[in-house]
Image (spheres, rainbow, N blue to C red):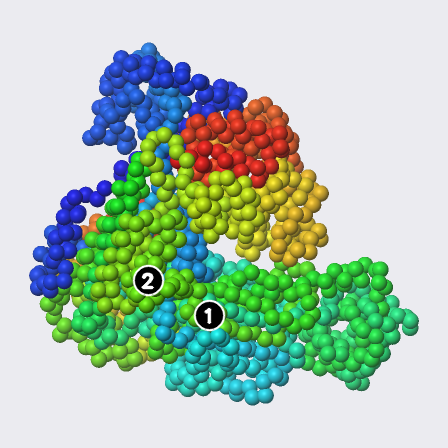
């Protein structure tokens, strides 16, 4: 049976529905929402692996993975910009997707957040649900948008060189956004007519759910001596769904947090000659979205696998000698060094992002403390889907203990994903092909 | 699941164990001869236990258990404070657990005060008596409320709305009950996530079913025609398709947009032909730069990229009459092991636009080609005599004319100058064209430095024959071709006759271009092309059921979102067969025969009240809700739904929108989502006719009742016509939905779905072979039921149900010509027949590398003879990898079961698994002298091998096999675990079916006619 307190709450919320409120978030959403420390997730993907130079070139200090393991690890030259966050991040090595080596290695970005058997998909599908969407499923009732899916290239690209890392529960790619202005307008400048439409749709759903609740209750009365347990489960679940919808509807009335947008330059696009400007704007937008609690799940594909898309040219724009894909294939010393220098560039961007998250205050600490940031690639070096470069930052308030380089040899990446879900208090018994959570790790 | 639910669930699962244990208990040592005591005795005994409880049991529980197992602490989730002397049903599993723990002296734990031996005995005695009494008292029947399983929901929605689409794939899969079934009320949980999915699905499905009557549909219809040089104006552009593409030349196909004849007005869809793209793909690199394309041949083109090559002949060949296709040989598509571009012979139409929704229809104009049988490497050239042979001299010219005196079969031998092989040999005989390799014939000594090759056998009419040949890119090396008559009664002739009779199997697939691998998914059933005349073959599907990621509106990538319509001659086992001739392929979608479509008219029914919205809405609601609820809607329900409609209409929604709102409520109401058997009290009652119709229909069809069942229920005639209905339902194609579900769950075929086969050890167990082998147990069961054959065939049979793929797996390929149809094949092999030697079972019970006798034994004990072993104890020690890594799995298992604490259970499992020892993890018999398959079964019978075990089960233990079938099917039919009394009933009454050989249809009837099915 639904608990009476729930019904009361619902009635109260329902009574308020439709009245435009200018209440601060805390009062509008009720104590239990506001007092819960938010748990957020952000996945950042870089394609073609990281530089792990050949020993013979004598440039080991440019290896992306720290040379030492454990607490004593040392940053390499390409990860040096991340040093200020030493106590807020960790390197994880040895992880891989067991399905990785079975599929074409160019698919590793498609698989990165899903772990799916792309070489043998379920009939009629291509991929499986991505980690960010599992998170979104559980965090969506606490914020305005279930998730934010960003990529260097808009849309989904084409299959098996997909331009997004996020897949819905049917395994279909979710089109990504790549234009800072469009992202900004959508997230921070929602227009009135679409809001009104959204409200109308939510109210319709609530009305219909009410009707179903009504019909369930009256059926329940007719049921004589029949077993009511299923009916109770149904009523409880319906109530839960309805209160989620009511919460969503409330969001429409909650004014956006006052934020400082002065650092944004919304004229920048991915076609820029200065890739750093583009990434900084995108990262600033993500940080602002977290700060305003617009969403709690973000996936951002920084560049595309293989020689796809505009990002392939970024190294050239930075004065390096070859395209991203060609650098990743380099065997010579100069090429491997340049590939590492591109890693350095990416580290600078990620460091900027972590810095922003650190600046924003949040319940119980900074936004960074309430956000698990996953940064990595689907291949260690290009097309080699083992020992996936993985860096996890933030999330101290979710129990993550940082400042280490943990090696879990030949362990499914999905185990790390399951650990992330558990840290976020998402009750999942498994994720993709996980065999358990990561033991002796940072979670 | 909440903690309370979890505890409840585990208790209920435990109950099943308790009930089964009870059979052993009361049955004494002889397995399964359980006879309950007379109820009167138990009524008396029950009160005795209740009286004794405060003296004999309660004080001991208080003294030794309560400190940890109270309502607050609930150590291990167990509490004993609420237990009473009544030994209520809901506490039986707990009592059973306590009994086990206390008698094994596992509880109280060592470091706690221990009861004396007398105390222990007093407690266990009391529990034993209480359990015995409780198990045989009549169980109250309180109806049933269980939600539809995902497949039931999918089928019901599809039948109710008349839509082909599968909307249900977003639902989380159902859990398995303790008995392995997904339809058990206890395992069918509900969560908010699921409810949200129900709402979303209903919304989508109603949008698809209901149209705006005033609108005109937009219909896409085009045809691609094939034939060499058919297109006088091919597009001159090079298509920007990246690495390793292979296209048919645009000169060889032509695309035309059509306007189909329809009995209603519509707008023809015209494909967009002008595009601006900035991004393309050359090799592995992105090419950037704006480029404008404007031709229908950038929107539709013919792609043949697949795994290159073909073992015999050419994968595809364009001739003036169309495109010839050889069977598409599947590729495992595993990177590093094989090419990942799909099968060999992989023809598909690539195109940019297809409708977003609705049904579509693909019409293929095709024929069986009047083909030549290509000969194999090493086959001999024919001795040419003047009487039987005609030669064409090609030394000077590639063309020649021959005169064929007698119609009949001829072998074509090719003679050419020596040199390296130079590719394919092309031969045109009259209008027909053949292509193949010239395999050097070993027989002719290379005198005169001449190479000879036996090329093919062909049927020729009498008369003049024009001939033209080419070897590789020239004909320079060709010397002559000799046609020799093949005697009608020769082996060669027989081979050819078998060959020319084989019909190509036409398959249509729909998917999305992938840079590697394939997303092509079959559209409808494969069709047999058994005539040489061109005919239309129609394939239908719902577009949503096929992969279709959205491309952003302003996409500027040349390769994004390209869809593919694959057309194949389907492969079975590589036997020679005539090529498939494809003349044209036509697409139409959304496909409507009427407007508004039937799905809409089923909701917006014909009515004299169409002009009175309120009356009409009432009528529609009554009609739809009754069909959805599978019984007449009640006045109160109708009224409540009408209120929903009134509210919607008041909110200025259109009639269609407001009806959608009501229907959304209907489709998310428990009356639709749940199967409800309403009960007025704890005594057993008859199902009402509508409840019976539903129960029957979900049992035998896994979907809602059809009109006839509804009518019989309405006239209250269903009970009396039950037998006729069962027969009708078993003959119906929907019965396949029962066999598929029931066989999969009873026999745990899901294990086969997930087993990771070691491709190195079992190269024949490919993905495609697995798909077919997966059907073998299902088809076997279906055949046995449909033909009402004796149950012993399930374990021991002189036939296997197989198609060519399955037959080939068991080396029986030469015994069938059934294509992909499953037919019974006499195997004449003592190691085959019955489900125990089926690959889907045996490989499923392995790890894909090594056979596992324990898994096989436990499966047999549980599934086939219904003597389930106890669950493994929670503290099974892991086999440590480091110290036993050099041991085989078998040795590891031996070591494991010799451990103390393991041996006892394994004694009732392993003897059933040992006889399988000569069957490998791929499920095939391997005469391995190392493997010992002799086993002493738990009742002392010795069997030498699986054949012995099968005979033992089919003869000596057939009653037990029958009980197992009854138990599992009754379990599935009732959607719950059975009570003790019900199991006893099945055992005692079921055995009467032995007199009629335990025929399977009879057994299903028996279950349906029993109280466990007919009462609530």
Provide residue A129's location: percent of width, then percent of height.
Answer: 36, 58
* Res B594 label: 1
**A111 left or right, relative to B747:** left
Q: What's the residue at 22%, 57% (across, down)?
A: A206
SS at badge 2: helix
Which residue sits furthest top? B118
Of residue B50 and residue B304, the one placed in the foreground of this image is B50
Please report the residue visible at 48 percent of the width from the left and 83 percent of the height from the top. Answer: B296
Pinpoint residue B63: horizontal percent, then vertical percent.
24, 18
- The quarter of the picture where the C terminus of chain B appears is top left
Of circles 2 and 1, the one toward us is 2
Label drawn at residue B283? none
Q: Residues within 10 Å of mark 1 (few under 14, many from 20)?
A: few
In this picture, is B143 found above or below B58? below
B769 or B150: nearer the eye? Answer: B150
Residue B381 in sight? yes
Residue holding disc 2: B616
Q: Is residue B167 left or right of residue B238?
A: left
């Amino acid at each position: 049976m639904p608990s009476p307190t729930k019904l009361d709450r619902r009635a109260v919320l329902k009574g308020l529905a439709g009245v435009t409120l200018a209440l601060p978030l805390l009062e509008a959403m009720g104590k239990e929402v506001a007092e819960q420390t938010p748990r957020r997730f952000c996945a950042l993907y870089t394609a073609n692996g990281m530089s792990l130079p050949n020993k013979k070139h004598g440039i080991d200090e440019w290896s992306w993975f720290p040379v030492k393991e454990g607490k004593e690890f040392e940053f390499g030259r390409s990860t040096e910009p991340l040093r200020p966050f030493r106590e807020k991040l960790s390197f994880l090595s040895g992880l891989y997707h067991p399905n990785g080596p079975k599929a074409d290695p160019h698919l590793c970005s498609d698989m990165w957040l899903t772990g799916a058997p792309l070489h043998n998909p379920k009939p009629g599908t291509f991929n499986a649900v991505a980690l960010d969407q599992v998170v979104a499923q559980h965090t969506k009732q606490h914020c305005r948008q279930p998730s934010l899916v960003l990529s260097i290239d808009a849309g989904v690209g084409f299959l098996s060189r997909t331009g997004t890392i996020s897949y819905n529960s049917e395994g279909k790619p979710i089109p990504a956004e790549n234009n800072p202005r469009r992202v900004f307008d959508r997230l921070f400048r929602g227009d009135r007519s679409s809001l009104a439409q959204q409200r109308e749709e939510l109210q319709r759903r609530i009305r219909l759910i009410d009707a179903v609740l009504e019909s369930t209750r009256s059926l329940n009365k007719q049921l004589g001596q029949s077993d009511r347990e299923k009916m109770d489960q149904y009523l409880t679940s319906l109530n839960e769904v309805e209160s989620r919808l009511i919460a969503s509807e409330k969001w429409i009335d909650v004014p956006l947090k006052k934020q400082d947008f002065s650092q944004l330059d919304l004229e920048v696009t991915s076609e820029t000659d200065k890739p750093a400007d583009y990434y900084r704007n995108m990262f600033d937008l993500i940080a602002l979205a977290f700060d305003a609690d617009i969403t709690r799940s973000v996936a951002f594909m920084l560049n595309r696998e293989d020689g796809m898309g505009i990002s392939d040219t970024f190294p050239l724009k930075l004065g390096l000698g070859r395209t991203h894909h060609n650098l990743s294939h380099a065997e010579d010393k100069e090429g491997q060094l340049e590939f590492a220098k591109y890693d350095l560039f990416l580290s600078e961007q990620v460091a900027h992002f972590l810095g922003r998250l650190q600046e924003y205050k949040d319940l119980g600490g900074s936004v960074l403390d309430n956000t698990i940031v996953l940064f990595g690639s689907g291949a260690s070096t290009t097309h080699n889907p083992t020992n996936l470069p993985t860096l996890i930052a933030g999330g101290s308030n979710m129990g993550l203990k940082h400042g280490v380089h943990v090696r879990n040899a030949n362990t499914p990446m999905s185990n790390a994903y399951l650990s992330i879900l558990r840290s976020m208090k998402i009750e999942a018994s498994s994720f993709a092909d996980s065999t358990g959570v990561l033991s002796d790790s940072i979670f | 699941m909440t903690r309370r639910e979890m505890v409840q669930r585990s208790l209920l699962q435990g109950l099943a164990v308790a009930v089964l244990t009870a059979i052993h208990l009361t049955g004494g040592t002889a397995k399964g001869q359980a006879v309950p005591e007379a109820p009167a005795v138990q009524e008396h005994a029950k009160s005795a236990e209740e009286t004794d409880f405060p003296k004999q049991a309660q004080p001991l529980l208080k003294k030794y258990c309560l400190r940890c197992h109270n309502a607050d602490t609930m150590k291990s989730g167990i509490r004993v404070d609420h237990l009473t002397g009544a030994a209520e049903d809901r506490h039986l599993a707990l009592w059973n657990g306590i009994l086990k723990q206390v008698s094994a002296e596992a509880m109280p734990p060592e470091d706690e005060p221990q009861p004396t031996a007398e105390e222990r005995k007093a407690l266990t005695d009391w529990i034993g008596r209480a359990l015995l009494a409780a198990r045989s008292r009549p169980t109250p029947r309180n109806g049933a409320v269980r939600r539809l399983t995902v497949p039931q929901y999918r089928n019901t929605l599809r039948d109710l709305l008349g839509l082909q689409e599968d909307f249900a794939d977003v639902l989380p899969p159902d859990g398995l009950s303790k008995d392995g079934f997904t339809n058990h009320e206890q395992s069918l949980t509900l969560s908010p996530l699921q409810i949200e999915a129900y709402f979303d699905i209903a919304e989508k499905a109603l949008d698809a079913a209901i149209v705006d009557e005033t609108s005109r549909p937009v219909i896409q219809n085009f045809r691609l025609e094939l034939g060499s040089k058919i297109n006088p104006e091919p597009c001159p552009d090079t298509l920007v398709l990246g690495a390793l593409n292979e296209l048919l030349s645009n000169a060889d196909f032509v695309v035309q947009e059509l306007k189909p004849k329809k009995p209603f007005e519509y707008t023809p869809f015209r494909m967009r032909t002008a595009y601006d793209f900035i991004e393309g793909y050359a090799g592995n690199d992105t090419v950037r730069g704006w480029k404008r394309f404007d031709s229908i041949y950038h929107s539709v083109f013919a792609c043949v990229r697949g795994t290159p090559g073909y073992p015999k002949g050419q994968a595809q060949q364009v001739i003036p009459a169309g495109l010839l296709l050889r069977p598409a040989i599947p590729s495992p598509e595993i990177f590093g092991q094989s090419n990942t571009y799909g099968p060999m012979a992989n023809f598909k139409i690539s195109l940019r636009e297809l409708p977003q929704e609705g049904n579509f229809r693909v019409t293929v104009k095709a024929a069986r080609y009047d083909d030549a049988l290509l000969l194999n490497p090493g086959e001999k050239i024919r001795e040419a005599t003047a009487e039987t042979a005609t030669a064409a001299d090609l030394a000077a010219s590639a063309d020649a004319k021959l005169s064929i005196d007698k119609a009949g079969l001829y072998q074509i031998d090719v003679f050419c100058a020596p040199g390296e092989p130079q590719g394919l040999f092309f031969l045109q005989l009259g209008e027909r064209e053949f292509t193949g390799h010239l395999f050097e014939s070993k027989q002719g000594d290379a005198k005169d430095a001449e190479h000879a090759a036996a090329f093919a056998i062909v049927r020729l009419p009498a008369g003049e024959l024009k001939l033209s040949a080419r070897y590789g890119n020239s004909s320079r090396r060709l010397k002559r071709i000799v046609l020799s008559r093949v005697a009608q009664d020769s082996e060669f002739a027989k081979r050819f006759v078998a060959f020319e009779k084989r019909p190509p199997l036409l398959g249509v697939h729909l998917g999305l271009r992938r840079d590697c691998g394939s997303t092509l998914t079959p559209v409808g059933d494969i069709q047999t092309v058994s005539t040489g005349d061109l005919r239309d073959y129609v394939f239908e599907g719902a577009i949503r059921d096929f992969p279709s990621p959205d491309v952003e509106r302003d996409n500027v990538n040349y390769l994004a979102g390209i869809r593919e319509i694959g057309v194949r001659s389907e492969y079975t086992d590589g036997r020679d067969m005539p090529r498939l001739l494809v003349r044209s392929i036509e697409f139409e979608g959304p496909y409507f025969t009427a407007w508004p479509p039937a799905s809409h008219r089923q909701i917006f029914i014909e009515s004299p009240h169409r002009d009175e919205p309120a009356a009409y809405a009432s009528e529609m609601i009554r009609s739809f809700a009754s069909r959805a609820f599978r019984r007449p809607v009640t006045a109160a329900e109708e009224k409540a739904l009408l209120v929903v409609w009134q509210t919607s209409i008041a909110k200025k929604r259109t009639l269609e929108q407001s009806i959608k709102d009501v229907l959304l409520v209907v489709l998310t109401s428990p009356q639709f989502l749940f199967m409800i058997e309403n009960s007025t009290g704890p005594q057993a009652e008859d199902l009402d006719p509508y409840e019976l119709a539903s129960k029957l229909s979900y049992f035998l069809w896994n979907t809602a009742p059809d009109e006839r069942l509804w009518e019989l229920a309405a006239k209250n005639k269903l009970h009396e016509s039950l037998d006729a209905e069962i027969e009708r339902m078993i003959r119906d194609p929907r019965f396949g939905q029962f066999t598929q579900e029931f066989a999969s769950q009873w026999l745990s075929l899901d294990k086969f779905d997930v087993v990771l086969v070691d491709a190195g050890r079992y190269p024949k167990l490919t993905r495609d072979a697995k798909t077919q082998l997966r059907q073998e147990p299902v088809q076997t069961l279906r055949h046995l039921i449909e033909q009402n054959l004796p149950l012993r065939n399930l374990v021991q049979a002189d036939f296997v149900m197989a198609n060519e793929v399955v037959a080939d797996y068991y080396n029986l390929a030469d015994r069938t010509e059934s294509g992909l149809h499953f037919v019974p094949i006499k195997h004449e092999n003592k190691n085959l027949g019955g489900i125990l030697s089926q690959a889907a079972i045996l490989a499923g019970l392995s790890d894909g590398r090594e056979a596992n006798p324990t898994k096989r034994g436990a499966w047999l004990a549980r599934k086939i003879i219904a003597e389930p072993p106890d669950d493994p104890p929670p503290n099974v020690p892991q086999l440590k990898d480091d110290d036993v890594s050099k041991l085989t799995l078998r040795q590891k298992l031996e070591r494991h079961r010799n451990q103390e604490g393991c041996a006892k259970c394994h004694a009732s499992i392993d003897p059933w698994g040992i006889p399988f020892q000569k069957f490998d993890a791929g499920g095939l018999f391997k005469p391995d002298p190392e493997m010992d398959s002799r086993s002493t079964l738990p009742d002392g019978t010795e069997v030498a091998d699986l054949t012995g075990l099968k005979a033992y089960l089919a003869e000596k233990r057939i009653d037990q096999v029958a009980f197992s079938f009854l138990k599992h099917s009754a379990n599935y039919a009732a959607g719950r675990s059975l009570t003790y009394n019900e199991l006893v009933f099945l055992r005692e009454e079921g055995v009467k079916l032995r007199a009629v050989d335990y025929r399977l249809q009879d057994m299903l009837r028996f279950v349906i006619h029993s109280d466990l099915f007919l009462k609530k």
